[in-house]
Amino acid sequence: MNSTYHSEYLQLQSVFINPVENAFVSDLKLQEEWEGLNYLSQPNYNKAIKEYKAFEALLLKSKLKVNHFPINEAVKIDAIYCRDASIATNLGMILCNMGKGGRINEPVLHRQEYLKSNIPILGEIRYPGTLEGGDVAWLDETTLAVGHSYRTNEEGILQLKSLLEPKGITIIVAELPHYKGKADVFHLMSILSPVDKDLAVVYSPLMPIKFRNELIRRGFQFVEVPENEFESMGCNVLALAPRQCIMVEGNPVTQAGLEAMGCAVTTYKGEEISLKGGGGPTCLTRPLLRSY
């Protein structure tokens, strides 16, 4: 069995997550932090625990290794969206430098756990560079797409290139639009979720033309998310294996589009853990090893 960290869609073998009890911690912490972090409203702690347990059960059902980030007083509730603080590569993890000020301590938490788990660290993005994992997606084993956004700046992209291009990795930059501005959570993976080597869920109205055309040139077909399912995270789809997907419930058109392309789709209720904080299943996970 061959394995790689350079995939968004191969059979997932191991993953890090940050459960509600460790990230949200308590109703008091949620009350103190949700507004400053631009959540739509305060998540309900007890409901969030139930939602998260159901979400984690979907991962465990696939018999993959699930690792937990521990509780850490230095990070805020956004730490539940653990994809953003690091990037997985075959050469080691890359620690990000968060573009959202309230999340600046999350890469330190990731570093501690990777070292504890004997997972090597390739490097880190340093000030004045910023880069968040939600802006980064593997298109194939030697091609990494990165969004230039309000969370990921040009200096961060240059540092990412310096770490990976000498190792034979091609970096494709997608110039993301202003959309709702600096305060909004808008990453490359807000508009792109690869679910197979030649299939991606996309929201074309916000996709850069050059980048969209490059995906087509590479042979990708698209499941197009309708406008009324964009805010409900129709475009945020986690592949556990090729065309085996998890998504937030309440996006029937996108789900039907995936199923029409031969995908098996499982949904979870994400009102508290996803919709209010702007983070779907890809955001809730830091995938590591995948196999083929």
Image (spheres, rainbow, N blue to C red):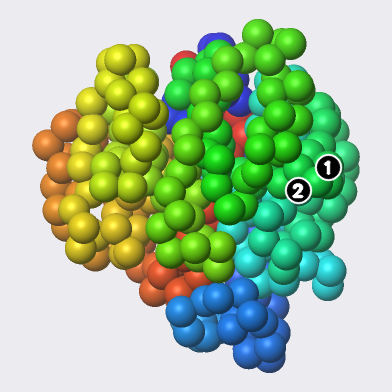
Amino acid on which disc 2 is placed = Asn
Which residue is rendered at x = 52% and y = 24% of the image? 172
Callout 2: helix, strand or loop?
Answer: loop
Left or right, residue 173 beside residue 232: right
Is tag 2's residue or tag 1's residue first in the polypeptide sequence? 2
Residue 10, horizontal then vertical, whole percent: 45, 26
- Packing grade of label 1 (10 A; few <14, some 14-19, many >=20) is some
- Picture mark count: 2
Residue 133, horizontal then vertical, whole percent: 61, 44
Q: Quadrant of residue 157?
A: top right
Q: Quadrant of the N terminus?
A: top right
Amino acid on which disc 1 is placed = Arg
Residue at mark 1:
126
Q: Is residue 62 visible?
A: no
Disc number for residue 97: 2
Q: Nearer the viewer, residue 12 or 278?
A: 278
Residue 150, horizontal then vertical, whole percent: 58, 53
Which residue is rendered at x = 46% and y = 24% of the image? 139
Is the residue under label 1 in contact with that under label 2 (CB below 8 Å)? yes
